[in-house]
Amino acid sequence: MKKTNIFILMSLLIALYIQSAPSTKPLTFDDFIRLKRVSDPQISPKGDLIAFVVTEMNKEGNTSNSDIWIIPSRGGEPWRLTSSPKADSNPRWSPDGKKIAFISTRKGSPQIWMIDPKGGEAYQLTVISTGARGIIWSPTGKNLAFVSSIYPDCKSDECNKAKEKKKEESLVKAKIFDQLLFRHWNSWRDGKRSHLFVIPAEGGKAVDVTPGDFDTPPISLGSRHDYAFSTKGEQICFVRNIDPELKISLGTNNDLFVTSVQGGKIERVTENRANDNSPHYSPDGQFIAYRAMARPGFEADKYSLILYDRKNQKKINLTENLDRSVNEILWSHDSASLYITFQEKGRISLARISHKNKKVERILKGHYIGSPSLTPDGRKLVFLKQAINQPAEVFSLDLKTKKLNQLTRINSKLLSKLEVNHAEEFWFEGAEGDEVHGFLVKPPFFDPSKKYPLVMLIHGGPQGAWSDNFHFRWNAQMFAAPGYVTAMINFHGSTGYGQSFTDSISGDWGGNPYDDIMRGLDYLLAKYDFLDKNRLAAAGGSYGGYMVSWIEGL
């Protein structure tokens, strides 16, 4: 009887322990690495399917691998279309929906491959020694365009191949340069230029349509949006900087040009001395919409949305009254309006703008979205959405009802086991009496009766901003997981609060931004009793590292 009572008591204690034990745990670095990265959603021409990319990291192998997945646009279970042990990315539907072109490294260098969206074996389209990246289809389905980094004095792939072989076999590994720009971020220039090529969709010879000693897209402020086929597919618009090399290293004079898909004569579209990029032809072929800065040499200037009339060559600024910098551009199918995204108070807003009256209508705000595309019927937008406690997933938005629908849940199973907190916002009076914005992330299993150390993250740029997004480099959850309260302040100079606020850091790196951080710290310590004023830290990279050193020296 005594043994029975002891057994019952122990069973009850075990049951109580199991019930009281948390069902989630703090995020670890291993968990962080296991999170999959969803990107590049692409709607099929019929609108029934969405292709997207999932990237997985391998800590033991110090590698990553990307595959292409497909999901019904109404929602449902996704399926993996490619399963190569090498990277498959950049999926692009053919206009008839019968093929998906993509970039793969399954045979070494990145090349264009084709696959039936229903499945089956993929086949290789390009065999170019310098590799291919950034595919786009012509609207007719006849051609594809891509970018490859080649030696500008070479007229053939054999020449590029010979130069590469000579460099690899040379015993001299020193790099010799006699001009700028010899290195951009972490990439050596090595005498190569990015050129734009056009290749028939059925295969054949790729034509370099941007010959010369210039980069397309540009080395500075360039992107995958910097070239586009015209509506009829006979012309291609692209971005390059044709200034002398020294000016390119110091300036931002990227311009729009057009040429035939067969190559040949190149005509200049813009003469602006500041940065122009991201050309987008209207579906009716009348306009090219693009982004433009106004101040030469200033990388953090406001991007305006400009409309270029191909017939009369007039240019109209559609966002002169919008004090936000345009990120992404998307035409409506009837060519009457455009959809744009822009950074706004730590998030990315979505708006529609009519090119007839310049009226800006905010459709979605308070979220962090990207890579938008419009369904063929024009009723829904598909995009990536993320938050500080949620890696990017594919969502759709009904433009009539404004209903958001989450389509993918690639990380839901892992996230359900993790204790990650949402971002809390705060505002305070900063330098010059201006309102300054910040985010706060509490540690897992937060207890307001306890005292917690605070780490202040300081963003780089300096014209940058903390946002409500799942940043895989400066991840707020990883800082909070060991038990820190993590604060992030968008001080003077940050983006998304108006251009004058961004400009205010110029010539004042250690002034108002420092005051904002100190005032923000005082505000947080006064407001939150759970913060331990004796355990404070700061961390940052680039300008953030500069500011950490500045704080330490004062």
Image: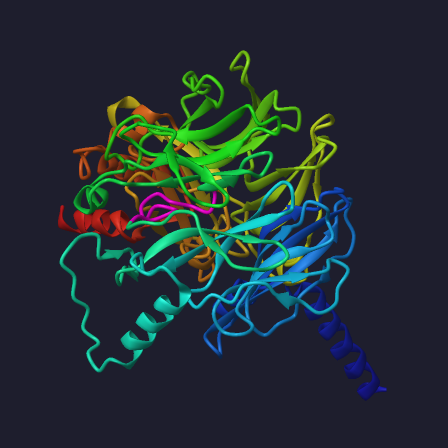
Task: Indicate whether 111 appears above or below 529.
Answer: below
Q: Where does residue 550 sit, x and y in percent of width and height?
A: 17, 47
Residue 236 is left or right of residue 508, and the answer is right
Front position in the image: 433 or 38 = 38
Q: Which residues are magenta?
A: 214-225
Q: Give the x, y percent position of residue 246.
A: 17, 45
Horizontal side of 271 relative to 373 (left or right) equals left
Which residue is located at x 72 percent, y 36 percent?
376
Magenta highlight: main SS: loop
**In this rendering, position of residue 6 left or right of residue 148:** right
The answer, for residue 416, to whether it is visible in the render is no
- Say which quarter of the image contains residue 462: top left
Expressed as whole percent of the image width and height from the top left, the position of residue 324 reads 42, 26
Which quadrant is home to the N terminus?
bottom right
The reply to whether the magenta stretch includes residue 223 is yes
Q: Is residue 199 above or below residue 363?
A: below
Q: Residue at coordinates 22% horizontally, 57% vertically from top-left?
A: 182
Q: Residue at x 46, y 16 (%)?
A: 312
Residue nearest the observer in this picture, 147 or 206: 206
Q: Can residue 359 be seen from the camera position used here?
A: yes
Picture coordinates of residue 200, whole percent (x, y): 58, 53
